[in-house]
Image: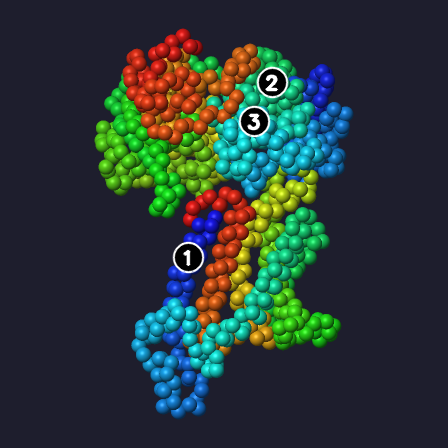
């Protein structure tokens, strides 16, 4: 099996629009080139998905082609747009292409918009520059463009600054700017990473629609096979600065040539089966939370202090050896819930019971020795580890703190065996966190948490900062450890598919309230709450035969802003089934079958036969 | 924004009060008194003078008296220059000092920003290296060295500018002092501006602006410059403090009839009221400069506008 595709294979694409040949990039002060012999082609009106893990050179390829690398980078090879050779073009000539014939959308809409210019000004600027529109005409057109990308309330948004918009809205603005001059090609670099599942689906659906209607070519750079499956006609897989495999979407997904591609696909597309971990007979409850309420103060000052309810009447129970997933979009209160349950934030009301002991009223110093049995691992593994300590010290530290009576030799032995257990090589024991990869850091985090054999492990989005393959490995590790030690798991994630694989039960939160609870398989197959259903529909399946059709059904617009008025169902502004009752009465939390609970007035009426 | 400005302005009052209180007691803690220098005075006359100015009364009473007079806009008489009140002295000197300070500030900012931008655009090029040299020189040499050097060059040798002195109708007299005062400021600002612009040019939104084909000039002026100015503006507070202390030296070197000499002379003569008057003026100026810097920051960065303070 050759590691590079035959040269020119991609150039046979009909009506080549962008063709990159033998592109090589080297940065000064490094020996190995960052890109080596990269060849890619995009035809008119088609979508090329470029996939690979971070650092594979996906973005670099396109930055290099359009002259956007930092000064000093050595670029060689060829890159043609239509008949124009791009490499070696002057900055001035490139400026007539960038933004005009090619639109670029980068990852991280948080930092990609200029902070001190209003959104409208930034859209209008491009129109004035490339199309020569006057101030007034540019503003009008900018408004239309923002509506085109379904930014709600475009007129008001135009006058706002980027920081006043949510991440999803900002990404819409980025897309509007990139589309302003009706480019032949749009390059979208991880356009949906770091967004919620529902927003991801909406943005991808929007891109698909625009591509179709404007007959625009699209390059979708991503590590997410699900996103590619929904949009791409052809796919290129990159690894370590090279294209290792390319072909039509059906070929790459259906019959991947390279082992690496197969591995990525397996990590992304594992059919959601029954949770792997054996459901141990439920032991006594390790965690019980009832009627939890948490409020945060908005702003400061005495007069303008407003309270924002982050969690409201949340109750749950987690039995020994069980796993419970907590799902919802960002801001739904899922992280607050875990923090309140661990007594890391103050609850305003409610009861928290750890291992049969009511801790709601205990002062923090009495909690310390109880914490040994309840461990937490975080989303960002690097930020949560002390940068000065070595891997071995980091993992051994909990023993020093909680089991100081243990002889040092015994401590070391336990540390070593834990390190081995989580699959960290002895060569890594002396390293410090910043010398580790994301996956390795997360292993250290897990080893640190598990070394005390806690009764409960709380994971807050532990996988979302990792590459697909690392995600899978860490997930498998968590499953195994759970099976061996009988630890209960409270697993927070916005990824319902992941929760389904890992947890027997799932709790769905929406704006601080519980909307549905049940066995995760059942929840998946027959969601009772409209919000749960929305979440499930938004999951991108890594299957090009199914995903485009699923994507076509996704709503394109921003979700409507939640209604401010109290009372009634919090979800009603977004709910397709809302009726008059929904506005008047808060839906009660009712039992809906074995182990299932839901808060929706109409759950029985619409849920049957919907999926 | 208006409410914020008002609140900050009101916030100046307590700070000034604390400043005045501390200075009031500290100047009196220093050994000696207002009339100690004039040795010729017989003890009886001195006691008489003390009584006249209320200096024989308990310290607390003197303090309250001072605050009471201040509340009525009376800064008190000067003990050392007995023909004038403190207010008259400040009224005479402040226009000179304020003009000097404003000119130095304008010059320092303009020169600093221009040099910094120029250096950042082509790091390592001639201008950038010149800046390094310029900064090293001006920051190493105190103004009582640069001042006379400049006077020597432009006054004595080239005869372009007056060496020292002051005439209200001739701005020429202000040029050398203002340049002397502005040079270190310009050097600090230029270095700040260079570093900050270099950092902003790496920012993701600058790359995005380039990716939109906006052109180098537009990206620089519309997207990069304003955020890059934030640290420069943040330095205006410390810069005001520098200008106040720096002007003391520069006014002495160039024999300007500004307020700087009052502060020095007042402190030497234990002229309590004069020192307090100067503390009030300079304190107020520094606080206002800091407020101006914060307002400018809010103008540069819309994100800080919404944070209630
Ligand atoms: S209660 Fe009404 S608005 Fe809320 S989810 Fe159910 S149907 Fe929709």
**Residue B177 placed where, x, y %?**
62, 69
- The residue where tag 2 is placed is A232
- Residue B74 pos. (x, y %): 42, 72
User: In this view of the protein, can residue A263 be seen by the observer?
Assistant: no
Chain letter behind tag 2: A
Tag of residue A147: 3
Residue most toward the top?
Answer: A609
The mark lying in front, picked from 3 and 2, is: 3
The quadrant the N terminus of chain A occupies is top right
Q: Which of marks 2 and 1 is in front?
A: 1
What number is the disc on residue B10? 1
Q: Which of the 4 image quadrants contains residue B10?
A: bottom left
Q: Separation of disc 2 and disc 1 at Cα?
A: 61 Å
Residue A298 spot, x, y in % from top left: 38, 40
Q: Which residue is drawn at 70% across and 24% down?
A: A18
Which of the two residues, A490 or A412, is positioned nearer the viewer here?
A: A490
Q: Is residue A405 left or right of residue B122?
A: left
Quadrant field for ligand 1: top left
The residue positioned 46% from the left and 65% from the top of the image is B283
Helix, strand or loop at label 2? It is loop
């Amino acid at each position: 099996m050759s590691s590079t595709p035959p040269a020119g294979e991609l150039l046979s694409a009909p009506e080549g629009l962008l063709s990159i040949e033998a592109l090589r990039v080297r940065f000064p002060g490094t020996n190995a080139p960052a890109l080596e012999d990269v060849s890619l082609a995009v035809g008119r009106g088609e979508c090329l998905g470029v996939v690979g893990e971070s650092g594979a050179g996906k973005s670099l390829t396109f930055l290099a082609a359009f002259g956007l690398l930092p000064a000093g980078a050595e670029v060689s090879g060829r890159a043609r747009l239509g008949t124009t050779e791009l490499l070696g073009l002057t900055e001035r000539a490139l400026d007539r292409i960038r933004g005009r014939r090619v639109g670029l959308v980068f990852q991280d809409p948080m930092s990609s918009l200029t902070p001190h210019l209003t959104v409208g000004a930034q859209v209008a600027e491009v129109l004035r520059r490339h199309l020569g529109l006057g101030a007034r005409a540019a503003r009008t057109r900018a408004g239309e463009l923002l509506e085109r990308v379904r930014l709600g309330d475009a007129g008001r948004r135009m006058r706002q600054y980027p920081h006043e918009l949510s991440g999803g809205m900002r990404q819409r603005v980025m897309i509007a700017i990139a589309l302003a001059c009706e480019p032949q090609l749009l390059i979208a670099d991880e356009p949906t990473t770091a967004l919620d599942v529902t927003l991801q689906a909406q943005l991808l659906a929007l891109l698909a629609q625009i591509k179709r209607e404007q007959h625009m070519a699209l390059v979708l750079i991503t590590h997410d096979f699900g996103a590619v499956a929904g949009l791409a006609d052809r796919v290129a897989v990159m690894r370590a600065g090279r294209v290792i495999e390319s072909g039509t979407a059906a070929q790459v997904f259906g019959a991947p040539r390279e082992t690496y591609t197969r591995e990525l696909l397996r990590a992304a597309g594992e059919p959601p089966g029954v949770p792997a971990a054996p459901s141990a007979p439920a032991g006594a409850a390790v965690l019980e939370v009832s009627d939890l309420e948490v409020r945060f103060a908005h702003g400061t000052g005495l007069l303008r202090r407003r309270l924002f309810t982050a969690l409201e009447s949340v109750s749950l129970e987690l039995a020994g050896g069980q796993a419970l997933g907590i799902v919802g979009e960002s801001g739904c209160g899922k992280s607050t819930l875990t923090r309140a349950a661990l007594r890391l934030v103050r609850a305003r009301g409610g009861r928290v019971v750890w291992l049969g002991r009511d801790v709601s009223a205990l002062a923090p110093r009495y909690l310390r020795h109880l914490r040994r049995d309840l461990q937490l691992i975080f989303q960002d593994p690097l930020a949560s580890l002390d940068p000065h300590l070595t891997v071995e010290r980091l993992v051994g530290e909990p023993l020093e703190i909680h089991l100081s009576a243990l002889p040092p030799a015994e401590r070391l032995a336990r540390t070593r065996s834990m390190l081995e257990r989580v699959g960290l090589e002895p060569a890594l024991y002396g390293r410090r966190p910043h010398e580790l990869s994301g996956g390795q850091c997360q292993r250290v985090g897990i080893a640190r948490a598990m070394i005390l054999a806690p009764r409960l492990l709380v994971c807050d989005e532990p996988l979302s900062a990792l590459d697909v393959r690392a995600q899978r490995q860490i997930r498998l590790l968590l499953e195994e450890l759970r099976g061996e030690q009988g630890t209960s798991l409270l697993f927070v994630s916005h990824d319902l598919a992941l929760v389904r694989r890992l947890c027997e039960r799932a709790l769905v939160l929406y704006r601080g309230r519980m909307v549905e609870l049940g066995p995760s398989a059942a929840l998946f197959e027959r969601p009772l709450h409209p919000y749960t259903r929305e979440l499930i529909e938004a999951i991108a399946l890594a299957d090009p035969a199914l995903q485009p059709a699923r994507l076509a059904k996704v709503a394109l617009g921003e979700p409507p802003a939640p209604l401010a008025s109290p009372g009634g169902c919090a979800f009603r502004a977004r709910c397709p089934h809302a009726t008059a009752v929904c506005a008047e009465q808060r839906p009660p939390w009712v039992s809906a079958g074995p182990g299932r609970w839901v808060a929706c007035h109409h759950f029985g009426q619409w849920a049957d036969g919907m999926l | 924004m208006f409410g914020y400005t008002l609140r900050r302005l009101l916030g100046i009052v307590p700070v000034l009060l604390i400043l005045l209180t501390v200075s009031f007691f500290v100047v009196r803690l220093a050994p000696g008194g207002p009339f100690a220098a004039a040795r010729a005075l017989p003890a009886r006359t001195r006691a008489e003078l003390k009584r006249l100015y209320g200096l024989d009364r308990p310290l607390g009473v003197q303090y309250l008296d001072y605050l009471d007079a201040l509340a009525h806009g009376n800064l008190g008489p000067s003990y050392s220059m007995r023909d004038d009140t403190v207010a008259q002295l400040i009224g005479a000197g402040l226009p000179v000092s304020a003009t000097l300070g404003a000119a130095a500030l304008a010059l320092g900012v303009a020169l600093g920003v221009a040099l910094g931008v120029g250096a950042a655009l082509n790091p390592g090029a001639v201008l950038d290296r010149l800046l390094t040299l310029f900064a090293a020189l001006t920051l190493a040499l105190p103004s009582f060295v640069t001042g006379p050097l400049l006077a020597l060059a432009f006054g004595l040798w080239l005869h372009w500018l007056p060496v020292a002195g002051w005439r209200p109708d001739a701005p020429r007299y202000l040029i050398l002092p203002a340049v002397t005062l502005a040079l270190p400021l310009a050097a600090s600002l230029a270095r700040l501006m260079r570093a900050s612009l270099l950092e902003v040019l790496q920012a993701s939104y600058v790359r995005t602006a380039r990716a939109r084909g906006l052109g180098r000039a537009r990206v620089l002026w519309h997207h990069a410059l304003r955020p890059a100015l934030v640290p420069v503006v943040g330095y205006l507070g410390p810069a005001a403090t520098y200008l106040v202390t720096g002007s003391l030296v520069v006014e002495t070197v160039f024999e300007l009839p500004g307020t700087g000499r009052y502060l020095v002379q007042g402190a030497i003569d234990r002229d309590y009221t004069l020192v307090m008057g100067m503390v009030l003026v300079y304190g107020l100026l520094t606080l206002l400069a800091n407020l101006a810097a914060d307002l400018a920051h809010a103008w540069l960065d819309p994100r800080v506008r919404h944070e209630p303070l």
